[in-house]
Image: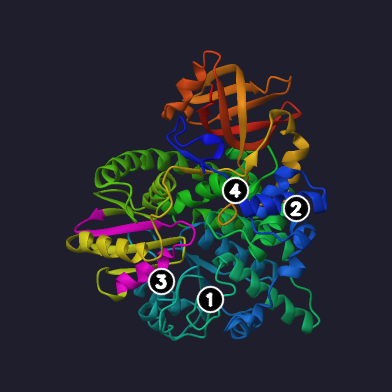
Amino acid sequence: MDFLGVSASLNGRRWVGPGVEEARQAEAMAQQTGLPGALAAVLARLGVPGEEVAGYLEPKLRDLLPDPRSLRDMEVASGRIMEAVSRREKIAIFADYDVDGGTSAALLLDWLGQMGRGATLYIPDRIDEGYGPNVPAMEALARDHDLIICVDCGTLSHEPIAAAKGADVVVLDHHLGGETLPDCVAVVNPNRQDEDGALAHLCAAAVVFLLLVDCGRRLREAGQRGPDLMAMLDLVALATVADVAPLRGVNRALVRQGLSVMARRARPGLVALADVARLDSAPSSYHLGYVLGPRVNAGGRIGKADLGARLLASRDPHEAQAMAERLEQLNAERREVEEAVRAAAIAQAEERGLDAPLVWAAGEGWHPGVVGIVASRLKELTNRPAIVIGFANGEGKGSGRSVSGVDLGASIQRLASEGLLIKGGGHKMAAGLTVAEGKLDEAMARLSELLAKQGAGIGGAADLKVDGLLMPGAATVELCEQLEQAGPFGAGAPAPRFALPDVSISFAKQVGSGHLKLSCGDGFGAKLDAISFGAFDGPMGQALLNHGGRRFHLAGRIEINEWNGRRAAQLRLEDAAPAAG
């Protein structure tokens, strides 16, 4: 049944509320625990049993962190790295050019630096070299180093790793493995085919963190004290959110603790990045994914590939400030490039139809550094897996994003094994591919077929899921803080969204470039301010601005707005619908 009877909102969306069983569980939880009904509704939606609520609201990393050696090759990998440190060997780090790769590299550089050792950082150019190790780079690194550590890449790099003659190679990765592994010292990867999948949701930085935990264990056994690993969780949190890893289990604890570390502003690189982004409040998972992550990524997308990793590893505030300012410039340039590709991709996808199991678009000259972001936009628009591909010289480099419950990486890898792609791989929620122009249509048709078998395209593109009703007077700072205890929110754990029923609008004004500010009330004296970004991109902005005294149902997320030392709850408005009568 449509929630509040909304089958087509002002933005053309159907509102969907909790099911009968979920609502029953929420009510029982509220009675059993004394928690606010809104919080109980969120916990019920997240599948938290009543008896586990206390532990869920206060997750302890020590209770959730797995034994690093539960991962295959971990003991061998940490042993080889400790050997390189003790022998003062020359170490190189080969990392992917995204946030997960950059943070993974920064973790190792930070740890090695505190151990009194340096390392050479190598991040390939996205356009000239593409993803992962390549033969020329590995040959060159092997000539000058004893150990090469590949992070967030390498699991499928058989030939490049074989080319690293004279050097040992350790792979720390999380991308889906093939039937065989490259011939090297160790491949630590929770997504190897011979793993049980219990830790498949870890990003590469979390794998690196577990390796450092095992190295710390070795140091303690030798009577030595290693670096403070808890202080490095800010980087793990950034990677986990930016790489769209599901925020459940240990991931949730890593991000929760990492946000606390980040709030201390002890890492010069993240401090400089937050300052240039004008982030003036305590960081949240939203800031990691939408403010800091894109700026770290900007170097790998359209600038110097290693800039983000070097910023995160920097201990010099002045150096960090200069790099952060350069990343800010690159991010602004990235937004311009992205907007042009986004408009063209959406127009093409709409012409093809947005109701298929796969939404895709491809264009000549589309910058490979922004196709992943545009794929994310298409996925959000349609609630379907999306692929966006940029072609140059008859070869397309593309990136895809998936929806919950649909494993895109496995399907992409299947296409590569069937010869429809030049190469491809990734993980459940994100993947990359290279395809010949002549095989594009056949490859996308086959991918759509594979994704349909997993249930892609079943959910309505316009469905807006709502946790329940909330009256304006109940939206308080205290409730926002209580809801935050159920976080952090992100992939696999969407942030709470509530509907404010039958409210009147007492103030509405267009601000900035297409945003809307308003105040609403319930008729009993309670008022709540709201902000809607991009409201005028669709019909909602004008309808609410010119409300004419009509009453509306509003839907969105409540948050704390801090301004001039004052803290107040506000609604981040996402959708609205006229109230009946």
Numbered disc in front, either 2 or 1:
2
Asked if marks 2 and 3 touch (Cβ < 8 Å), the reply is no
Q: CA distance from mark 2 to mark 3?
A: 53 Å
Residue type (three-letter) at the residue carrying disc 2: Ala
Numbered disc in front, either 3 or 4:
4
Query: Upstream in the sequence, badge 4 or badge 1?
Result: 4
Query: Upstream in the sequence, badge 2 or badge 1?
Result: 2
- Say which residue label 3 marks: 133
User: Along the horizontal axis of the image, is 397 left or right of 266?
Assistant: left
Q: Secondary structure at mark 1?
A: loop
Location of residue 452 with respect to 27 vertically, above or below: below
Q: Which residues are magenta?
A: 391-416
User: Along the horizontal axis of the image, is 289 left or right of 315?
Assistant: left
Query: Residue 468 in the image: x percent, y percent?
Result: 63, 41
Q: Secondary structure at mark 3?
A: loop
Quadrant for the C terminus in the image: top right
At horizontal 55% and vertical 65% (from top left) the residue drawn is 203
- Say which residue label 2 marks: 28
Q: Which label belongs to residue 189? A: 1
Query: Upstream in the sequence, badge 2 or badge 3?
Result: 2
- Say which residue label 4 marks: 18
Q: CA distance from mark 3 to mark 4?
A: 46 Å
Query: Residue 547 in the image: x percent, y percent?
Result: 52, 17
Foreground of the two, 333 or 541:
541
